[in-house]
Image: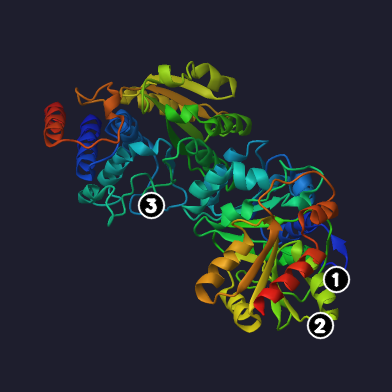
Amino acid sequence: MDKLQFWKVGEKVSLREAFGRVLVSLAKERNDFVLFDADVAGGTGAKPFVRQFPERVIQFGIAEQNMMAAAGGFSDFGIIPVVSTFAVFGTMRAHEQFRTAIAFPNRNVKLCCSHLGVDTGPDGATAQMLEDLAIMRSIPDTVVVVPADANELMGAFCSILEIRSPVYMRIGRSPAPVIFDSNHRFEIGKATRIKDGKDITVIATGVMVARAIEASDILKKKGISVRVVNLSTIKPLDNNEVLSAAKETGAIVTAEDHNVMGGMGSAVSEFVSQNHPVQMKIIGVNDRFGKSGESDELAQYFGLTAEHICKAVEGLLKRKM
Amino acid sequence: MNLEQTATEIRKLCLESIYYARSGHPGGSLSVADILTVLFFEEMNIRPDEPDWVDRDRLVLSKGHACPALYAVLALKGYFPVSDLKGLRKINHYLEGHPDVKIPGIDAPSGSLGMGLSQGLGMAIGARYTKRSARTYVILGDGDMQEGNTWEAIMAAGHHKTDNLVAILDANRLQGENSVEKQMNYFPVIEKVSAFGWNTIEICGHDLKQIKNALNEAKSKKGKPAFILANTTKGKGVSFMEDKNYWHGSVTMKDEELKKALEELEYKNG
C-alpha cells in the first residue's frame, strides 16, 4: 500500500475523509475488495475511490436490501464487498439481509456506514442513526467497530479487511479532533487506555472519546483522577480492560452518540454487572429521536458534551462514596 | 433410473423425511421436485465430492421451505448419505428446517422469502467480476414475488445484464393461507419481468423436456438474465395433496398418509 498519510493530532477531520483516503490507499496494494454503493458515495466518503477505481465499484442504486443480500452472494467468489451507505439504510432497512444472508452463513462482508447519531446534524431525525449499535451487536459472529478519529479509522479499516468475518464499522460525519498519532495501533477487540486515573473510568466511543478527554482535563483541575478508555470495538468487548476499570477505579461512566438503550453502555454494563458490579452511568441520547441542528448544538441539546460527562462523573463519584 | 424415475424417487425421499421430522412443507417441495431434478441431474456443472469448488454452478432455493426436496436431490447426488434425510429438523442433526450453508451442497441460506434472488445476483456479478464461467440458478416461489426485495433484485439484474443468472419461478399459485389470486395477486408476471430487461420464458414446470429446453434457451440469449415462469401444481405427484392448500405446511403426516403417498409414487415408478 501507499504509505498511509496520517493527520496531525489536534486537526479536525471528518472520518468520511479518512474512509475515502484509506480505500484509495489500500486499493493500490490489494485487489481483493470492491465497493458496493447505493448512490451515496459522496455522503459516505467513498467518492475518491469511485473516481480512481470505477471498475471496482458495483452500483446498486437506492435499493439497500438488494445490495446487502447481493454482497452475501458476491463474497462467495473470494472478493470482499465493502458495503457502504448511510447507517439508517445499511443497518436498519437491510438489517435482516445482513443477519440472514451475511452473518448467519458467516460471509466475509464489511458494512461501513456513515450518518451516525446526532453527529449527523441538520439532516435530522430520520437520518440520525441512534439504534445501530444495539441491533448490530446482537447479531452473532458480527464484529462491531467504532473508530474515534480519522487516523484510527484508517487503521481499523485495514484490520477489518484482514479478518474473515462479517463486520459493521461506524464512520463519523462531523469534523472530529484527531486524537491518535501515526504510532497508534488499532487492534480488533482491544480498547485503548488514553489516560490513566484512579477515581473513576470514562469509557467512550466514537465522537465521545475526544469529549471524554476534554472532560478528564477539566476534572483533573478539580482534583479528580479520571481514567479514559477508548472502546473502539464494541464487539467483541475487551473484557480485560473493562474488568480493570471496574476493579481499579470502582465506577464507570460510558459515553456514546447512540440511544442509551442497547448500545456500548449496555454492552459494558452487561459485562460489569455479571462479573464485577460497580456503580455506572450511561451517557447517550435518552431514548428519544434526534432532530435538526448543527452537530455541536445537538451535542449540547442531547447532553453529549464534555460538561455533561463532567457532571455525570461528579454525580457518580458521590454515589461511589 | 431415468430422469423421470429420479424425480419420483426424490418425491418419495422428501415425503419420508417430512414424515420423520413430523413437520415440513410437502406441497411446495413436490411442486419444485421436477425443476430440481433437471437442474442437478442434467444442467448444473457441479462436483458433489467437492461442494465448495469455486467454479461450480450455484443454486439458491429462495423458497427455502421446499428444502426437503433439495436435500433429497443432494443426497441422491452423493453430497451426503441418503439415510441422513431422516435427521431433517432434528436437534442433533445438521439438516436444518431451512437451508443453511453448513450443509454440503447448499450455496445460500434461505427461508426468509425475498432474499434469494439478490444473493443469486451477487453470485452472478461475483462470477463475472472474477471472470469465472459459473452460472447461478435461483428458484423463486409465489411468496418471493410478493416481497419488495425480489423486485429490487429484478430491477438490478436487468440493469447489470447478468446473463449468467437464471431465475425459475415455481408458480403453484397457492400460498400459506389461500390462493395467490386471493391473498396478493402478482400476475401477470411475464410482462413485468420483461419490462425490467429480462429474457422471459413460460413452461410447464413438470415437463422435464420443457424445463431442459428453457434452460438451454436461457443460456443462448446473451446480455440478459433469464426468467422462467414454471407453472406447477402444489403437491404434484400425490393425488390427495395436489392443488390443496392444506399441504403447504408445516404439517405432521400420518402413517397412512405417508403409506398412501409412497404407494402412489411407487406405482408410478413401476
Q: Amino acid at mark 3?
A: Pro
Subunit ID for the residue under disc 3 = B
Could you classify mark 2 by the number of other residues whose Cα lies within 10 Å: few (under 14), some (14-19), or many (20 or more)?
few
Residue at numbered disc 1: A9
Q: Are the numbered discs 1 and 3 placed on the same chain, yes or no? A: no
Q: State the residue at coordinates (31%, 30%).
A: B248
Q: Residue at x 75, y 51 (%)?
A: A118
Give the label, 1 or 3, closer to the camera.
1
Residue picked out by circle 2:
A223
Disc 3 crowd, CA 10 A, few/some/many (<14, 14-19, 20+): some
Considering only order in the chain, which callout, 2 or 1, is on the residue closer to the N terminus?
1
Direction from residue B177 to residue A261 in the image, left or right: right
Left or right, residue B196 beside residue A315: left
Which residue, given by chain and number where applicable, does mark 3 sit on?
Answer: B51
Q: For label 1, count other residues whose C-alpha is less than 10 Å away and answer few (under 14), some (14-19) or many (20+).
A: some
**Can see residue A45?**
no
Vertical placement of A271 versus B162: above or below?
below
Q: Nearer the viewer, residue A252 or B76?
A: A252
Same subunit, labels 1 and 2: the answer reads yes
| Amino acid at circle 1 | Val
Q: Quadrant of residue A40?
A: top right
The residue nearer to you, when weighing A112 against B36, is: A112
Q: Residue at x 38, y 52 (%)?
A: B51
Q: In screen coordinates, is B91 left or right of B260?
A: right
- Quadrant containing the C terminus of chain B is top left
x then y, percent, for residue A193: 70, 77
Query: Where's residue B43, x and y in %?
Result: 37, 35
Numbered disc 3: secondary structure: loop
